[in-house]
Amino acid sequence: MILAIVWTMVGFGLLFWGAEWLVKGGAGIAVRLGLSSLVVGLTVVAYGTSSPELLVSLKAAWSGQPGIAVGNVVGSNIFNLAVILGLAAVIRPVRAESVAIRRDGPVMLLVTVAGLAVLWDGSVARWEGALLAVASAGYTAWIVREARRERRRDEEVFGAMPTGRALVHLGVGLALLALGSNLLVEHSVAIARALGVSDAVIGLTIIAAGTSMPELATSVVGALRGQPDIALGNVIGSNIFNLLFVLGLAAVIHPITGAEVRDVDRIFMLGTAALLWPMMRSGRTVGRREGAVLLAIYAVYLAWMWPRG
């Protein structure tokens, strides 16, 4: 048990550092393409910090652990909005750009509804996963095309990075993420099962929080540096990516059946997504009070869910 705990912590650390390297490399390339900080947050940063969720869910689906594969996605989305954005807003109110209010917030809510519809019976067929993955590619292409029209540059946020160095960061980041996800799934599952915890609860809490650490670090740093576009874009983009690409690709690799995601999980995921839009529209800012509300919602969710273990 002690050795499993040690290896689980090592897995968390590798996921965190791997995502950091991946984000730095990807952001360096994106800056050279002239993308705005909001779009970089919605795409490169969001997808990079969601790489742990992707790798963990893929491994879980392939290993015949559908509860972890789906629970990781649902739990991460709840954690992203309630804890990560909530904490970032408590540190410093997060300003919402008009494009986030008009386009990205509604898209995230629509994707959440679509994801819940697909997951309604606890299963995701291979063809459903393919549709989700294609939708993810289409959304990414759309917002990048829109961003290229603006031609805004944000080197002051990420800093200029030579292309070769950026590619090295990408490669090292992916390698660390692959190793970290393997350690995290294998050993955290062993610990939780020894304690009598179900796969769904493992995925919804332990693994979901662990794989969301890169998003947490990125959003908090963005808030501290006065870059709310990064914090908000990271959360919205990660949630869209998780439901479309992570869940979709996991189902394509291995169809998901029998996932134990219950109504309470669906309610909290949809509720937090629906709550964000009016928060952004109210003064175009997610303030400290709203951040505290989001954190309180997650506390209620944990208190409601843990008896399931």
Image (cartoon, grey):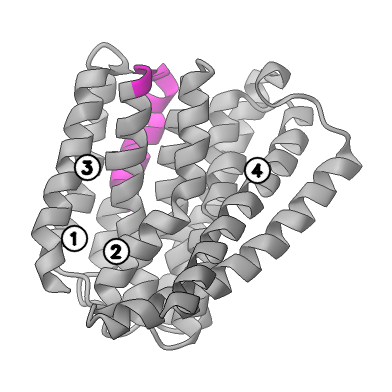
Q: Secondary structure at mark 1?
A: helix
Magenta span covers which residues? 91-111
- Among numbered discs 4 and 3, the one appearing first in the sequence: 4
- Among numbered discs 3 and 1, the one appearing first in the sequence: 1
Judge by depth and name the residue closer to the eye, 50 or 302.
302
Q: Secondary structure at mark 2?
A: helix
Which circle, 2 or 1, is nearer the viewer? Answer: 2
Q: Is residue 173 above or below residue 283?
A: below
Judge by depth and name the residue closer to the eye, 301 or 197.
197
- Residue 207 falls inside the magenta stretch: no
Q: Which residue is mark 1?
A: 265
Q: On the picture, is 24 further left or further right than 66?
A: right
- Among numbered discs 4 and 1, the one appearing first in the sequence: 4
Judge by depth and name the residue closer to the eye, 293 or 66.
293
- Among numbered discs 3 and 2, the one appearing first in the sequence: 2
- Among numbered discs 2 and 1, the one appearing first in the sequence: 2
The image position of residue 245, as x and y in percent, is: 49, 60
Residue at image coords 31%, 77%: 192
Look at label 1 and name its amino acid.
Answer: Asp
Q: CA distance from mark 3 to mark 2?
A: 15 Å
- Residue 278 shows up from this direction: no
- Residue 129 shows up from this direction: yes
Residue at image coords 63%, 50%: 17
Q: Secondary structure at mark 3?
A: helix
Q: CA distance from mark 2 to mark 4?
A: 24 Å
Q: Which residue is mark 3?
A: 272
Look at label 2 and name its amino acid.
Answer: Leu
- Residue 100 falls inside the magenta stretch: yes
Q: Which residue is mark 2?
A: 204
Q: Which mark is residue 23?
A: 4
Q: CA distance from mark 4 to mark 1?
A: 29 Å
The crowd level at tag 4 (other Cα within 10 Å; few <14, some 14-19, many 20+) is many
